[in-house]
Amino acid sequence: MKKIYIIISAIISLAIASSCSNFEELNTNPDAATTVSPGMIATQVLKDTYRFWNPNPTDWATANLWSKHTAILETNPNPYQYYYSYWPYGGYSYKMLTDLKRMVEFSKGTQFESSYKGLELFMKAYFGYTTTLDLGDIPYSEAGMAEEGIFKPKYDKQADVFAEVLTDFKAAEEYFAKGVNFDGDIMYGGDVTKWRKLCNAMQLKVLQMMSKKITAEQKTRFAEIVAAGHLMESNDDNFQLTYSENPNSSHPYWDGEYERIYDGVSKLTVDALKKFNDRRLFIFAEPAQYLIDAGKSESDFDAYEGAPTELSADLLALNNQKGMYSLINKRYVEYKAGDPMIKYAYAEQCFIIAEAIEEGWVSGNAKDYYENGVKAMLTYFMNLPSAATGNHGMPITQAYIDGYFTGAAAYATNGSKTDRLHQIWMQRWLIDFFQGNGQSYNNFLRTGYPEFPLDPTTSMNPDDQTVYPKRWKYPTDEQISNPVNYKKAIDDQYGGYDGINKTPWYLQ
């Protein structure tokens, strides 16, 4: 932490140092930044947080395996597909908390101070939420306090982390409500109104993720947030990272044909879309070649066949050579800008509220929220430029959207509560298709639906091939840099063993 502070301080010192010679003036690069602004820090933090971790087609394909939307069809088994990882350790993003402090300090006394305070608290809460889901108990209340002399922060109980995260999202919303549009925002263009909506939507998401442990008071809080109305209203409020034609910010899968020919759409995905007569199938996938050879049309649902993600790598590769599976749609490698990476969609908010209504947390019509969520995602793809041509003659039109809710896609008003929840959870899972972020896995752990295929004979889970991993291990350097608190955390939670199959508090 101190190193970051020293570096930033050095930059500031150099930036404000005045030049006193013509030579220096003439040799100053007019395009180079000479001062550090809060907007510059905001850009860097947002980029480091939300850009794909290693932007190339191979790693992008790997990142999509965890949530079972796709399968790798090569003989060398990818651990991500079989419930393990090349690197089964989580990590902390808290080093950026120091940068965020500087961002707020540089904005003090300006009209933007409240907005940057909102961003600081939002990012802290976001880091805390995602990290606790990955690991369990984590440092939060003392995180990022090295400048205050706390170099070995205590691990807060996961229940306390959830509570503090909710408090910080609420405080962030209040700062944004008082703020003005600000610079450096690559997600929302500095629109404080959208950030305010997101802060409230994130509280709903956090509360629902802890549904197994939620209290009556927290359910009331959920209902109050919905009633207040400051929430996402349409796809225009989607929290997403938009790629561009610029080679430094293009979609990670662009120009990845060498990878695409080994990337199959999962059977779980294909079967769900067929069940709903959902035209997203034609936007997500290519038809299976052997079915085309047998006379099927590319615009026929029956021309598509998904790859079972639990099959052995050898068998998947062999079947792929025979053209038995639907591969990822070619449009994903042909468009440099590609699909935005959705981090939180308006549709997801709809499904979150629909589930809450079914559970009795809040009043309302779950059917309306379910349908609004589905319509939002269908409209999203209807308006997506790359989907206009890459749809195999089955475009999503307004007429199609208007007639979508028939058969299995119609809300099961007369069915059981479980039937309706399964519809909500499946549609929520489909949002995350080929998004490279694996957001769906935690919701699967919470709900058990859609049921992810698991075959003990192919599972690579090192401790138990019959179960789904529930967490990542703590960062390896914690054993050296914070050993006492690390040991207490694994002793208190996991019986002294830092294993991937141990169950965090929110899933118990």
Image (cartoon, rainbow, N blue to C red):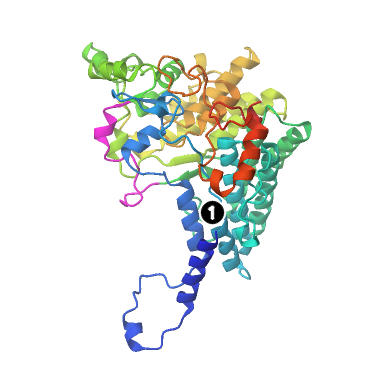
In-front residue for pair 463/457: 463
Which quadrant holds the N terminus? bottom right
Residue displayed at 48% across by 44% down: 240
Q: Quadrant of residue 68?
A: top left
Residue 359 seen in render: yes
**x and y percent of residue 33 in the render?**
41, 70
Left or right of 83, for residue 349: right
Mark 1 sits on what residue? 95
In-front residue for pair 46/4: 4
- Residue that lies at the very extreme toward the right in this rendered image: 217
Q: Quadrant of residue 436?
A: top left
SS of the residue under disc 1: helix
Q: Is residue 493 above or below residue 121?
A: above
Residue displayed at 46% across by 80% down: 17
**x and y percent of residue 480 in the render?**
54, 47
In-front residue for pair 271/68: 68
Q: Is residue 495 above or below residue 35?
A: above
Callout 1, which amino acid? Lys
Which quadrant holds the C terminus? top right
**x and y percent of residue 10 in the render?**
48, 71
Residue displayed at 57% across by 41% down: 131
Is 416 in the magenta?
no
Magenta residues, start to end: 243-263
- Residue that lies at the very extreme toward the left in this rendered image: 293
Left or right of 47, for residue 137: right
- Give the crowd class for mark 1: few <14, some 14-19, many >=20 residues within 10 Å: some
Q: Is residue 102 above or below residue 327?
A: below
